[in-house]
Amino acid sequence: MLVVMDAHATPEQIERVCAEIREMGYTPNPMPGPTRTAIGVTGNEGAIVETSRIVLLPGVREVIRVTAPYKLVSREFREADTRIQIDDLIIGGSEIVVMAGPCTIESREQLLAAAQAVKAAGATVIRGGAYKPRTSPYSFQGMGEEGLRLLAEAREITGLPVVTEVMDTETLPLVMEYADIIQIGARNMQNFALLKKVGKTRRPVLLKRGFTATIKDLLLAAEYIVAEGNGAVILCERGIRTFDDHSRFTLDLSAVPVLKSLTHLPIIVDPSHATGHWERVLPMARAAIAAGADGLIVEVHPNPVVAVCDGQQSLLPDRFAEMMDHITRIAQAIGRSVAGRPASTGVLQEPALKSQ
Amino acid sequence: MLVVMDAHATPEQIERVCAEIREMGYTPNPMPGPTRTAIGVTGNEGAIVETSRIVLLPGVREVIRVTAPYKLVSREFREADTRIQIDDLIIGGSEIVVMAGPCTIESREQLLAAAQAVKAAGATVIRGGAYKPRTSPYSFQGMGEEGLRLLAEAREITGLPVVTEVMDTETLPLVMEYADIIQIGARNMQNFALLKKVGKTRRPVLLKRGFTATIKDLLLAAEYIVAEGNGAVILCERGIRTFDDHSRFTLDLSAVPVLKSLTHLPIIVDPSHATGHWERVLPMARAAIAAGADGLIVEVHPNPVVAVCDGQQSLLPDRFAEMMDHITRIAQAIGRSVAGRPASTGVLQEPALKSQ
Amino acid sequence: MLVVMDAHATPEQIERVCAEIREMGYTPNPMPGPTRTAIGVTGNEGAIVETSRIVLLPGVREVIRVTAPYKLVSREFREADTRIQIDDLIIGGSEIVVMAGPCTIESREQLLAAAQAVKAAGATVIRGGAYKPRTSPYSFQGMGEEGLRLLAEAREITGLPVVTEVMDTETLPLVMEYADIIQIGARNMQNFALLKKVGKTRRPVLLKRGFTATIKDLLLAAEYIVAEGNGAVILCERGIRTFDDHSRFTLDLSAVPVLKSLTHLPIIVDPSHATGHWERVLPMARAAIAAGADGLIVEVHPNPVVAVCDGQQSLLPDRFAEMMDHITRIAQAIGRSVAGRPASTGVLQEPALKSQ
Amino acid sequence: MLVVMDAHATPEQIERVCAEIREMGYTPNPMPGPTRTAIGVTGNEGAIVETSRIVLLPGVREVIRVTAPYKLVSREFREADTRIQIDDLIIGGSEIVVMAGPCTIESREQLLAAAQAVKAAGATVIRGGAYKPRTSPYSFQGMGEEGLRLLAEAREITGLPVVTEVMDTETLPLVMEYADIIQIGARNMQNFALLKKVGKTRRPVLLKRGFTATIKDLLLAAEYIVAEGNGAVILCERGIRTFDDHSRFTLDLSAVPVLKSLTHLPIIVDPSHATGHWERVLPMARAAIAAGADGLIVEVHPNPVVAVCDGQQSLLPDRFAEMMDHITRIAQAIGRSVAGRPASTGVLQEPALKSQ
């Protein structure tokens, strides 16, 4: 921590700040300069110092924090990548994992058709929403427990683990009965009560970055879960809110290498919600893998035109299979592979633009 | 709703879109133009049409929604301002209401000192956090129920109603036992489970705008509450996240006149969290009232230097009294008054800069 | 400057950084901590140190700058407010200055009607654009020199100084023949060639904040002008670009107190371009004055319906007069006054909503 | 264009709007609905209608534009990709073009070392700045004409075309004597005087997206150039300004597929300025190619530690060669190739993290 004094701070003011730092149990290191004095603080052992005591003292201009406020999730705490195992599947290893399925579970037919199609194309986790956070109270809110039961059936039929969103602490026990991976959505990334509850379980968690969350916010949200004892957290970049209006959100792919350097947790990318349009899912899925992501979560619908929600961003099964071909080749190009996919061969065909 | 076709859309594609619209029960109004055709959709009676069915049809470029997706909270639904009464106090009337107190309840002494000081200066609601949403799991998380009990004591002593934050559905019943106004924080603005639960009560709700929420998002969050039957919602602008880094958040004061034109609900402003620094609270509190806000929620601490949280943005009681003087004069200048304050007289003194 | 080392940095790496700092002519102050070492740099006398030499050394995690990179415009360099005098008018004193007129000069009739109307209501500077920066090449680009001549005529008739925009270095000499204040628009805030040229003149400059500029960027742009010898710079907040879409731009009023603390230059606000809608000009003009701005620049058009540009945000003369009444009262409420306006008396009437 | 009326608009108000539309020479198409009437406007032949006349009429709620305001640069105007030829090189074809070199030309040794190294690794255009837009007036502003002469020497030695930035209209003739491609920087993207002047030349232009520019703004800036007769415009995504603070800018890669669908102009990506850190250049360069970009512009410095500017984001020649290997493989994976590079073979080695 560094305390920057005003240019006109008096020696008494500087001494008072040093005294306060000492009283807090730390060591002040004053560095007088020609225009102003700065005071380094050492001995805080990485603790999060409440800075109000200092910043409000007379003559103080600013307090700059140096230590990152997250610990357990940091690369410094644990250098090796975290690998999360679910049956035979490993998330966070050299193999790229693709989770796919419909945004919202609408019916048995829809879910099973999607699940079988994505499995055939190489997805290794089935996704599907039973409880849906909807901006409007008048939009379809999900099938609830009935959706969860269908998800269990999809798991049985395909043999693949399933991921689904939990929206609040009350339904968590129910969701736990069905989900192999519990998803926390972007709007709930700072629902701290929910983070703590999920942290007390030992179920893998897919934590989506809030669309206004900084990288630090995301890592602190993960820290909430890990601090409760659950280290199986998968981070997910899904687009941030910016002035730009050409997509629903701005997919922040440079977050991938940044997160890779700051944390040992696996990072996946959701190109469907970020772009909001199926035509952009293929290029952004490729780009995510090229940027170093450990996986993808993608929306696939057997008949997007009749989807009750987000049909515009869902891939048809054929388009999804094409996407899998592309990312398999991208993965190979950077020395990785896609879980459950043979090494790619043959000629690649560029998709025709428009009209799925 | 307006469907914009591609420049090269064929007559068959246009007819297919029209057929789809008819099948959905609405009326298509094709408008052929020299470069492209647009199709107006009427007869939807304001329903939220799921647009996937149309936007994915061949030849469709874009679907533009015209109708606002919120209803009950809109000015068109109800022209007269909503006034929320709590004992003698009316929020949303011509009188401006100031809520004040510490960010976090830390002790009996602290809360009661703050409560008495803000009452003396003219605040008409006491604020204080018992459950605190903190970005880091290692920060103080609030006193919990003990804090709520202290808040009740502050109410008894001052005779003023109290507002406090509820963080999740599980603690809502407990918070309901103590709070006159239930606050939903910015991070929970889209915690839909919580919104619905609070909507089933008949207690006034202070709904803070999420720091990445558009005006439409905020109004839809309010719609969640009102749609459950609780019309007593107070909106609160508290700063949005932007590229700008000179303040913690960018206080979006132009949201005040915009909200005033779109909704009948009262709007207050939180200058403390937005600016993050006590020196900017006074000018932004004045600006909020000048922009037309119905009230303020402000952090006051008897001794900010020892605050466990957000001390930097808390006003000393004397500074708060000065702020009340200023806003009383601003209110008069625009033909309003401040609840519980006599009309201002006498000479106004500008505050010295820095050092509370 | 503070150099933060990696947690695992070796003593040799730390020593190498210290050696590099010494070689640059500064003094390293190593502060060993339990998890990492930080090295304070002193002796740089406020110089802008190119940090590449250090940040790329092995074992360095981050370099944090402490000293603000602007000097001449800073409050620390010069404590007293800069006052800019144009004839009898002083900008940056206790009196608030209002500049008003049409966005674009369209005709002699239009400009003179607007000029006389705004003078009658108390404006003390006439604004009007002869060269217009337009996002589209197909929009009206301004009357050019003919517009400047009309502006000179408006000055002669009203006796008020005029402000107009210069768009490039080539037309600067021509604009200098007519303008009392030279405006640099938001899109040109980092047109460094233009800043330098304007800095070589001794004409007052109205420098608009770029809509993506941080406060630091704005102050450095002003520093470009002042460093060339022209200290008469008026800063102008006119809205920043954010995710929010309810207004054209988000008016960042908290920039006003922040700028007041960082710089001695006067600060005015443009509520017309920021909000993009005349109905919001009145509340935001009031809020700007309440926040501490030294003036306003406002668009007024005798007949906005036929304006070639930005008619939607222009006030009718009657509405402008009403705005002047309001801000005169707000100014009084905070102990200031409006240049050229008698102290306000009488009853204030709230404007009816909508329909100018 | 669609005019949306207020819910309570009277038949007279609707008729007046229709009359106004007719008077402007267009055709009104009223669509009465249960809550409000909307009026479609046809017959405008794609002209940019100034909407003030209509939006300010009584009873009008909103005017929604449907037609894109750019024409010549749009995919609808010209379906085939624009290919820009410079000697043997084609930009915008199936081959990916890489431009590389130092941010700033510092000396003959530095530039020639960089030029030869990037040529050896497969770059086909040399970049180097002689005039540098710097946020601070105290930063190095470039070598000026001396730098241009060195650039010409680098061209002669390598046989590769050169790209360099022009900062203002006055130095354009000088830059034209040396540059094969004229770069317009992000801060000048809306310097309309410069755009028009460059549009009057027939030299290829590299137009960088302003860091606050929407896609529409960027395409309109390109339209300024093309409308003057110069169709050889290369668009460049280089990061936008967002709340996110982990990188200097947020690289908006989804702009690539969006631009590809809206315009026929080639699109390249600058991963150096966007990320601001050399370690992130490799993953983001790969991601850009995977997203469909037609090329890259990358900073390479023979000795970044002594760079006068942006050393932190410059690649060492060895790292650049590694990047070329990676993107060659990515290009192959999506059925493209890199200009001047043989098809890749052999084993790919992942770079060690940190320490160039």
Image: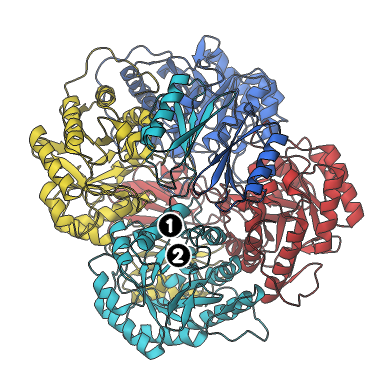
Chain colours: A cyan, B yellow, C blue, D red
Quadrant containing the N terminus of chain C is top right
Disc 2: which chain? Answer: A
Horizontally, residue D182 falls left or right of residue C302, namely right
Earlier along the polypeptide chain: callout 1 or callout 2? Answer: 1
The residue at 27%/30% (across/down) is B303
Q: Give residue B104's position: percent from left, percent from top.
A: 25, 41
Name the quadrant containing residue A346: bottom right
* Residue A235 location (% of width, % of height): 45, 65
Residue C332 position by quadrant = top left
Instruction: Give yes or no for contact between labels 1 and 2 (Cβ–Cβ under 8 Å).
Output: yes
Amino acid of disc 2: Leu
Res A218 label: 1
Q: How crowded is mark 2: few (under 14 residues within 10 Å), some or many (20 or more)?
A: many
Q: Is residue A72 above or below residue D340?
A: above
Q: In this view, does A165 lie to the left or right of B58?
A: left
Q: Nearer the viewer, residue A206 or D251?
A: A206
Total numbered badges shown on the rendered structure: 2
Q: Quadrant of residue C323?
A: top left
